[in-house]
Image: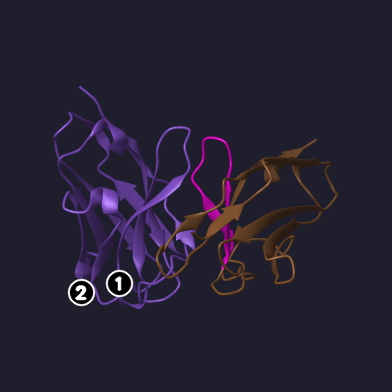
Chain colours: A brown, B purple
Amino acid sequence: NFMLTQPHSVSESPGKTVTISCTASGGSISTNYVQWYQQRPGGAPTTVIYEDDQRPSGVPDRFAGSIDSSSNSASLTISGLKPEDEADYYCQSYDDSEPWVFGGGTKLTVL
Amino acid sequence: EVQLVESGGGLVQPGGSLRLSCAASGFTLSNYVIYWVRQAPGKGLEWVSGINGSGKSTYYADFVKGRFTMSRDTPKNTLYLQMSSLAVEDTATYYCVKGVRPIFGGIIAQYWGQGTLVTVSS
C-alpha cells in the first residue's frame, strides 16, 4: 500500500524558513502529483501547493513545494515565517488503487 | 475569483437523509471535476465523492456507496450531495472542492469551500 509519512510537529521562529517533509512508502513519490493543504485551527483546509510545486492564486511565493526522488519524499518549504502560518499541514497524493492518500499531518508552531 | 459555498448541513437522526448543496462561481463547471471531502471532529480529511466535468460520471468512496449520490445542476452552477441512511459515523464537516482538470483520476484539490456541518445523532 502506498503511504505518506509526515513529522508530527515542527517549530520555528518568525522570519525563519521551515521545511516539512512527506516521505512515501510502498511506491515512488514522483509517480503522481503531491499536494499540500493548510488548515488553521477551526478553519477549512486550503491548498497551498498542488501538482508538486504549483501555487493557487492568492498563495504567496513564500510557500514552495518540491520532490526529491532520491529520498522518495516531497517537501513544503515556508520562508519568511509569519504567525499566521501556524497551522496543520497535510501532504496528499494518490496511486492506481486509491484516489486519495493522505499524510498524517504536521503541526507547525511559529514561536 | 473561485468561490464554493456549501449549505444544507444540520442535525439529522440516524437513518435519516440530508441534501447538501455547493454553489460554485468564478469558473466553468464543465472544465473541472468537483469533489466532496469530509472531516469528522478532530480527525483527518476523507474523500467522499467526485463528479467529472461532463457531469456524466460520479465516483464514491466505498463507505458511502449506495447511500450517497452526487449530482449537478449546470445552469445553476450548483452541486449536490444527497445523503441517505445516515449513521453517527457520518458526522463531519463536508467540504466542496474544485479539482484542476475535467477528468476524475487521482484527486488534486485546488480550491475549497468553507464547509457545512452534518451532525447525525438521536
Q: Residue at x 76, y 46 (%)?
A: A82
Asked if marks 2 and 1 touch (Cβ < 8 Å), the reply is yes
Q: Is residue B13 above or below residue A94?
A: above
Instruction: Write down the chain letter for disc 1.
Output: B
Res. A3 visible in picture: yes
Decide if residue B39 is on the left or right side of residue A3: left
Q: Residue at x 47, y 62 (%)?
A: B109
Q: Is residue B34 above or below residue B44?
A: below
Decide if residue A49 is on the left or right side of residue B87: right
Decide if residue B9 is on the left or right side of residue B108: left
Secondary structure under tag 2 reads loop
Q: Position of residue B89 (x, y in %)?
A: 30, 35
Instruction: Write down the chain letter for disc 2.
Output: B
Q: Which mark is residue B38?
A: none
Disc 2 target residue? B56
Q: Position of residue A110 (x, y in %)?
A: 76, 39
> Is residue A10 or residue B32 the one in the foreground?
A10
Q: Residue at x 30, y 72 (%)?
A: B52
Identify the image quadrant of residue B60: bottom left
Disc 1 target residue? B52
Secondary structure under tag 1 reads loop
